[in-house]
Amino acid sequence: MPSAVDEILEKLKTFGYEAYVVGGCVRDCIMGKTPHDWDIATNALPNEVIECFKEYKVIETGLKHGTVTVLIDGTHYEITTFRIDGDYLDNRRPDNVTFTRSIKEDLSRRDFTINAIAYNPAKRIIDPFGGCKDIENKKVRCVGNPNKRFGEDALRILRALRFSSVLGFEIEKDTALSIHKNKNLLLSISAERIRVELCKLLMGTNAKYILESFHDVLSVFIPEIKSMVGFGQNNPYHHLDVWRHTIQTIISAKEDIFVRLSLLFHDIGKPLCYSQDANGIGHFYGHQKKSADLAHKIMQRLRFDNKTIAKVGKLVLYHDTSLQPQPKQIRRLLNKIGPDNFRLLLWIKRADICGQAPHLKDERLILIDKVEQCMMEILQQGQCFSLEGLDIDGRDLVDLGVKGPLIGKILNKLLEMVIDEEIENRHSNLIAKAKELIKT
Ligand code: ATP
Ligand code: MG
């Protein structure tokens, strides 16, 4: 434990109170991971906590829920009074908060056994629900009756999936059954909260298990997933159905949220674009655009920020562009999506290849490496692929007497010629060419 946490526990003890570290930090420590924050629980009431820490910098914003934040060396430590949550009316928020003097009662309101362990140096581990054993056996299990707990707060359904994915745990049988049974309660959860959990679970090491076994739960807020599940592709390049392929790409991918979201959506339009040729081979013409449109809609529904929506939409739209290590083609694509997205696109393509028929994998991955090499050279050499890199600009054209929309037209024509190596990106050449273009 950091010395500041020791200091806080000690301080509360000196004033005659009980205090523990609880929740995620205890779980992470038992697993040998470094916690990202430390939550403290105490039987002292909020105003008593404030009294104990009157020589410290204290933030009182969480007071209503019993939380006092103490600042030590620039780090926030939340100290929360033991509490039992009141009635849950909207499947989400406790109506009112009741404080209690018992750590066990406080632990009993927590979501999963692995999150319901407390520790302090004197009492050591307090684990009334078998959380340590569940950590050892890698199980996510509700504290108490799962149906009741998910009924109180449906967000716990997604938290269970997220913890399972991130920690690499299995969801215990009764908890899993209850998740399937109660999944529709998620409809009452705000899009923002769903989005946060979805992103975390996509990044987890155990995402495959969750996406395979709980797609019905994800379909509650992304119904478009339903038609992907079991949708056969009837195509020699694909050995997996659309959903299994999607899962394979996600778990093969770099741990980057833009890449993983793009992969979640990259083929979501496929079931709507299916056709079969005379040989019985399946095709999905136009699925890039369809998938990009659906990705837009879904992300808007889940209240993603506009930047993410635009970026992922673009990556989905271009995910199937066939790439060759040819500078002209690469400069053109750099112009359309920019270097950052280009790099992400290469990660997406690599992952996509990992979900396709294995006999083509090595060859296709080598091609992507060559494309990357070619892109790097273009960037390192500072080759021109955008109007900003062009050695002529609007003012030059104004000086030549060009006005209005024609300026943009001529600049873009010149850029196209530079990208295609029809003309060198040199000021004098471009001016000469511009003069020619003005005349025609
Ligand atoms: P993370 O590593 O994501 O922070 P965490 O376990 O610390 O994991 P938090 O969301 O920070 O999760 O919550 C802290 C603790 O509060 C949890 O460990 C759990 O005991 C309790 N908790 C949080 N949300 C809920 C909930 N919806 N229902 C019941 N208990 C909850
Ligand atoms: Mg936490």
Image (cartoon, grey):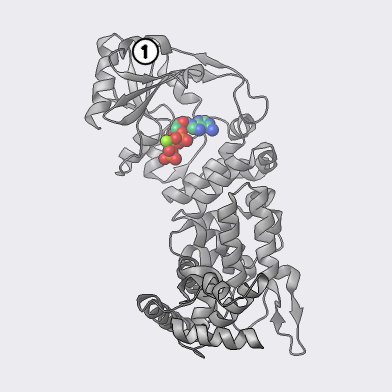
In the picture, the quarter occupied by the C terminus is bottom right
Q: Is residue 69 left or right of residue 344?
A: left
Task: Name the spot of residue 237 as percent of width and height, x first.
Answer: 59, 82
In the picture, the quarter occupied by the N terminus is top left
Task: Name the spot of residue 300 as percent of width and height, x first.
Answer: 66, 51
x 57%, y 43%: residue:
158
Query: What amino acid type should be assigned to the residue bearing mark 1?
Result: Ile
Residue 379 placement: quadrant:
bottom left
Helix, strand, or loop for circle 1? Answer: helix
Task: Name the spot of residue 209 as percent of width and height, x first.
Answer: 52, 56
Compared with 158, 408 (above or below) is below
Task: Name the spot of residue 353 as percent of width and height, x first.
Answer: 51, 76
**Camera-side residue: 144 or 109?**
109
**Camera-side residue: 331 or 189?**
331
Compared with 285, 439 (above or below) is below
Assess disc 1: are there few (<14), some (14-19) or many (≥20) residues with their C-alpha within 10 Å of its C-alpha.
Answer: many
Please say whether residue 143 is visible from this viewpoint: no
Compared with 426, 396 (above or below) is above
Residue at numbered disc 1: 50
Residue 117 placement: quadrant:
top left
Q: Is residue 107 left or right of residue 19?
A: right
